Image: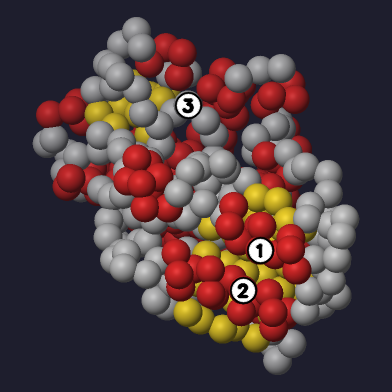
């Protein structure tokens, strides 16, 4: 029996497989969200990965449920939903779809992988058509609509057409080429002598020194295995970010819990020339940023690429910033061992108040 998509509002009225989402009455959850009821055998780093695992176990009783839904539209969730509706083609393209989901959610990818270029084209195509025809990620509130409601229109448009672009990305060149070219230029910068990476594996911290803010798909490309990125740009401009890898239940490796950044913000503000101050997002945000203050960024701005938002100039030199960040995490993580499946309550207990 074929699966079919239903808007999230209808999921509570019938048995439904939920992808990249949770719900009390779901027949089956295939999501990497923290604490989601995804069966152990189907756990994966991405929700699409969980779907692909489930497709390789078709005799799982819950897989006979035909209705499929998600409470938001993003690349990982869409790939998962599409894969359930197009199982044979999805399994044929499984390695590529896994790369697409990882790039879409974590912004990381091994560019030496022979499928990486096609993955980038597909992600850029999805991004471009989403912005052209609908609204950007986290833009539903500006339309005075809920994401669960508004995203159903995106699924209705993308589900019938994605397969043809998957099989031949060149068919979508007009849409994907502008962002693709921008990212490829940025990848060249990341691989050039102008960029220097310093790794602190015990902290899960990667420090990137590069001249200008870059698109995430380039900036986070080499961050596999790391969960915190300190970006240091020319002109004493900095951003620290907890990656999405610590918001979800990552299956492939253990992680350290998120720490409240209040102490680090206070310390950096004390070193900054007044009236400037460092501000940070709640640790429960999908990708919380610590940055020099100014106008508060919207969720859509925080999700957008670093080269598409203002980054203020600090009075602190890059060497001092790096030392303060490393010292903070070394102290904060002293005596804490990485592991899988932290709960938010456990994070709060070891990492301080979430604020």
User: In the image, which is nearer the foreground, mark 1 or mark 3?
Assistant: 1
Q: Name the residue under label 1.
A: 267
Q: Residue at the location (22% across, 46% down)?
A: 42
Distance Cα–Cα, label 2 vs label 1: 8 Å
The percent coordinates of residue 351 (x first, y second) are 42, 53
| 194 lies above or below 150 | below
Mark 2 vs mark 3, foreground winner is: 2
Is residue 79 shown left or right of residue 130? Answer: left
Q: Is residue 166 visible?
A: no
Quarter of the N terminus within the rendering: top left
Asked whether the residues under the numbered discs 1 and 3 touch, taking CB atoms below 8 Å apart as contact, a structural biologist would say: no
Q: Position of residue 317 (x, y in %)?
A: 77, 79
Q: Establish if 192 lies above or below 182.
A: below
Callout 3 environment at 10 Å: few (<14), some (14 to 19), or many (20+)?
A: many
Q: Which of marks 1 and 3 is nearer the N terminus?
A: 3
| Disc 2: which residue | 324
**Residue on which the image places disc 3:** 71
The local secondary structure at tag 3 comes to: loop
């Amino acid at each position: 029996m074929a699966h079919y998509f239903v808007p999230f509002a209808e999921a509570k009225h019938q048995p439904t497989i939920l992808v990249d989402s949770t719900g009390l009455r779901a027949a089956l959850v295939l999501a990497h969200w923290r604490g989601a009821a995804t069966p152990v055998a189907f756990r994966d780093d991405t929700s699409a990965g969980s779907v692909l695992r489930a497709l390789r176990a078709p005799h799982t009783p819950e897989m006979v449920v035909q209705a499929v839904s998600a409470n938001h539209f993003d690349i990982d969730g869409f790939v998962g939903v599409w894969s359930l509706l197009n199982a044979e083609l999805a399994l044929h393209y499984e390695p590529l779809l896994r790369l697409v989901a990882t790039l879409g959610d974590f912004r990381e990818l091994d560019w030496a992988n022979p499928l990486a270029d096609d993955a980038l084209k597909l992600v850029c195509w999805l991004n471009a058509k989403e912005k052209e025809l609908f609204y950007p990620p986290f833009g539903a509130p500006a339309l005075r609509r809920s994401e669960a409601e508004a995203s159903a229109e995106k699924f209705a448009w993308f589900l019938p057409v994605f397969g043809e672009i998957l099989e031949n990305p060149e068919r979508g060149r007009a849409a994907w080429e502008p962002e693709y070219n921008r990212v490829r230029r940025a990848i060249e910068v990341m691989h050039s002598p102008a960029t220097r990476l310093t790794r602190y594996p015990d902290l899960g911290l990667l420090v990137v020194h590069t001249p200008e803010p870059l698109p995430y798909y380039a900036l986070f490309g080499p961050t596999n295995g790391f969960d915190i990125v300190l970006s240091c740009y020319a002109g004493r401009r900095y951003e620290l970010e907890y990656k999405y890898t610590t918001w979800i239940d990552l299956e492939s490796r253990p992680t350290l819990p998120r720490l409240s950044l209040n102490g680090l913000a206070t310390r950096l503000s004390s070193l900054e020339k007044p009236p400037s101050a460092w501000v940070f997002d709640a640790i429960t945000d999908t990708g919380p940023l610590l940055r020099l203050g100014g106008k508060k960024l919207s969720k859509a701005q925080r999700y957008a690429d670093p080269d598409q938002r203002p980054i203020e100039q600090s009075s602190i030199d890059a060497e001092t910033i790096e030392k303060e960040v490393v010292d903070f995490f070394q102290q904060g993580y002293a005596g804490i061992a990485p592991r899988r499946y932290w709960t938010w309550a456990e994070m709060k207990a070891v990492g301080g108040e979430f604020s």
